[in-house]
Image: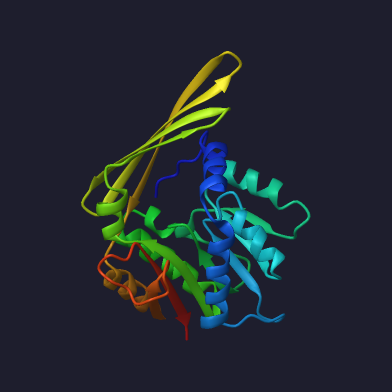
Amino acid sequence: MNNSYGNFARIYDCIMTDTADYNSVFAKYFNSIKKYGEFSKDKNILLDLGCGSGNLSKRFAEAGFDVIGVDSSEDCLSIALDKAAGYDIRFIKQDIRRLDLYGTVNVTVAAFDVINHLQSLSDISECFKKVYLFTEPGGIFLFDYNTVYKLSKVLANNIFNFDYDEFFCSWENSSRGNKVTMNINVFEKRGETYRRFTEQIVETAFEEAVIIKLLADCGFAVDIVDFDTGEAVSKTTERILFAAHKI
C-alpha cells in the first residue's frame, strides 16, 4: 500500500476541503447505513477506515455515532485531531491491511476510494478479512470504489493544477491499464521563495465481480449500486458503492 501524504497532508486537506462535497458524500453514506444496516443507540459504533484528515469522522460523530478513525498517515491524523476538538473520536495510526481494534464495530465506512489505494488482490483480501473479523454479526461495511472505466477513461492521462496563495500544485495522472499513477509537484511559498516537494499516489481498480468475490470469500453478502446515481451499475459507472453485510 502506498504510504504517501507526508509533506502533502496539509496540501491534500486544503484541496479536498475546496473540491470535495463532504456534506453530499456524508449524506450518501448515512442514507446507505439506514438502508442496509441498523442505527440505534445500542448499535452505533462506526469505523472510519482510511479516515484521512477526519472530515467525515467529524460529521459521523455529529450524527450520533461513536467513531473510530484509522489511517496510516500520522500527518493526516494530526490534522484530524485538530478538526475533532470537542468530539469524542478515537484516532488510531494503523495500516488498514493489519487492522487491530479493541472490540467490534457495527458499521465500517471507507470513503473516497480508500480501497483503490490497495495495490494487489492479496492486500485487498487482507483488509476485508480484518474488517469482517471486527464487524458485529448483522453489521455492514460500506465503501466507494473507483472503477476500471474511471481510471482508464476519466482520470486517465490528465493534468490538474491548483493555485492558492500559499502554494501551487500540479497533479499529473499517468494511466496504464487498471492503474493510475498520480505524480504531484507542490511549490509552497516560504517568504519570497518557494519550496518544492513531490508526492506520488497510485490507485488500482479491479472489476466489481472480483471485489464481490473477495468480500464473499470472507463471509459477506454483497449489494452494489452506482455511488453517484444510486442506480444499477453500468459500463460507464465511475464509482461503485459496495454494501457488504456480515450475516
Residue at the (45%, 41%) spot, across then down: 4
Q: Is residue 73 visible?
A: no
Query: In the displayed structure, does residue 84 sit left or right of residue 202?
Result: right
- Front residue (pair 178, 169): 169
Question: What colour scheme was applied to this rendering of the protein?
Answer: rainbow
- Residue 188, image x, y percentages: 53, 25
Query: In the displayed structure, does residue 12 sit left or right of residue 209?
Result: right
Query: In the displayed structure, does residue 203 sit left or right of residue 93?
Result: left
Query: In the displayed structure, does residue 212 sit left or right of residue 23?
Result: left
Q: Most extreme residue toward the left, as rendered? A: 177
- Residue 94, image x, y percentages: 54, 53
- Residue 34, image x, y percentages: 57, 80
Above or below 225: residue 199? above
Residue at the (39%, 50%) spot, across then down: 1
Above or below 132: residue 150? above
Q: Is residue 75 visible?
A: yes
Q: Most extreme residue toward the top, as rendered? A: 192
Above or below 28: residue 188? above
- Front residue (pair 59, 115): 59
- Front residue (pair 187, 229): 229
The quadrant holding residue 105 is bottom right
- Residue 62, image x, y percentages: 71, 64
Residue at the (56%, 55%) spot, across then down: 51
How many numbered marks are there?
A: 0
Above or below 104: residue 13? above
Residue at the (45%, 75%) spot, across then down: 243
